[in-house]
Image (spheres, rainbow, N blue to C red):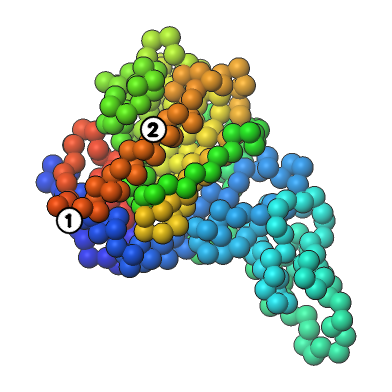
Amino acid sequence: MAITLSTTIDPDIRKAQTLPSSYYTDSEIFSEIKLSFRKYWHFAAHKNQLEENSAIELRHLEKLIDEPMIMTSDGEIRCISNVCTHRGMLVVDCKCSKTILQCPYHGRTFGLDGSMRAMPEFKGVEDFPTNEDDLRNFPVMNWKGLIFSGIEPSGLDSSLEEMERRVGWMPIEKFKYDDTRNRSYDINANWALYVDNYLEGFHIPFVHKDLNNALDYDNYQTELFEGGVLQIGIASDGEATFDIPEESPDFGLEVAAYYYWLFPGIMLNFYPWGLSVNLVVPLSVDSTRIIYRGFVWDKRMMGKGAGGDLDKVESEDQTIVEATQRGVSSQTYDRGRYSPNKEKGVHHFHQLLTS
């Protein structure tokens, strides 16, 4: 799954050292890792975002994998190139409800399937059109309304099987997109530091006082699977929880949140009110964009429990991660050690990144 770098993380967490600081500070290592993102699946959107639109621009994917893309629907959901095959202009710059997409530069038109339909002033051009004049289609995977795409992606099937087993009972395909929950933050830290922080609840009592009150820290759970990590937040007495059905392996537990991370940077946070998606977008070796998208299941549960004040939790995390970036940039620090009980998720991430 990982890139061709020389670091080895001992599979025995009791013996292992953490990533070398160069993974967070070296521009060449950053560039190699960023290039590898083209091999993985990334979250595109929820199908609900296309209920009133026929096409939406996926600008976050352009930043992630250096490929302008749009998601379209004419009954079938597709992810296609957003680059006009005439002179390279972007075809869509927002969202639209048109059945035909027209390049704003010279008027070339395309169907929602990417096929070229018409081009003015091209009479007499030989061997035109060909398949090369169509917009490229990229692979798409649809799991319960969550749409994933990429350039040449692989490796998501087992992660989705794990999610189906654990949270497949939720009506995720019926969740409603709520753009009032959209957020975008640029932080002064390496993307992997943000992932490190997400993958452990160890810091919660020290950093997130309100969240710590909502969760039973002593029963916080971390589970590893191929390509990802699941953290389960158990609720403190009286806090908001899921109504978990008997067929779930978690029946009988007072679950406040399911926190899923899928390599390299998809975070799917399920709360009783719905789903908060965090997308980790590396911008440079010491700069990262965090994008939030919200999909509501039960409005009555909003503002309650572990998912009640995500803006506050995010702000607290950013402060910690930015300070840690300064720390790992020090000449006195290179590698640390893991807590075997509390940092299993971080260890798993580091293995995936370096194996």
| Residue 76 or residue 186, whichever sits in front | 186
The mark nearer the N terminus, 2 or 1, is: 2
Please state the horizontal and vertical placement of residue 231, each as a whole percent of the image: 36, 33
Looking at the image, residue 255 lies above or below residue 58 = above
Q: Residues within 10 Å of mark 2 (few under 14, many from 20)?
A: some
Left or right: 238, with 145 as reference point = left
Residue name at image x 53 percent, y 20 percent: 303
Left or right: 303, with 19 as reference point = right
Residue 246 appears in the picture as rendered:
no
Contact, mark 2 vs mark 1 (Cβ under 8 Å): no
Please state the horizontal and vertical placement of residue 40, each as a whole percent of the image: 46, 58
Label 1: element kind:
loop
Residue that extends furthest to the left in the rendered view of this protein:
15
Please state the horizontal and vertical placement of residue 123, each as a whole percent of the image: 88, 85
Left or right: 38, with 33 as reference point = right
Residue 134 appears in the picture as rendered:
yes
Instruction: Report the amino acid beneath label 1.
Output: Gln
Label 2: element kind:
helix
Which label number is shown at residue 79?
Answer: none
Looking at the rendering, in which quadrant would you find the N terminus? bottom left
Which label number is shown at residue 331?
Answer: 1
Instruction: Report the amino acid beneath label 2.
Output: Glu
Q: How crowded is mark 1: few (under 14 residues within 10 Å), some or many (20 or more)?
A: few
Residue 135 lies in quadrant: bottom right
Residue tagged 2 = 316
Residue name at image x 25 percent, y 59 percent: 22
Looking at the rendering, in which quadrant would you find the C terminus? bottom left
Residue name at image x 13 percent, y 42 percent: 14
Please state the horizontal and vertical placement of residue 322, each as a whole percent of the image: 34, 44
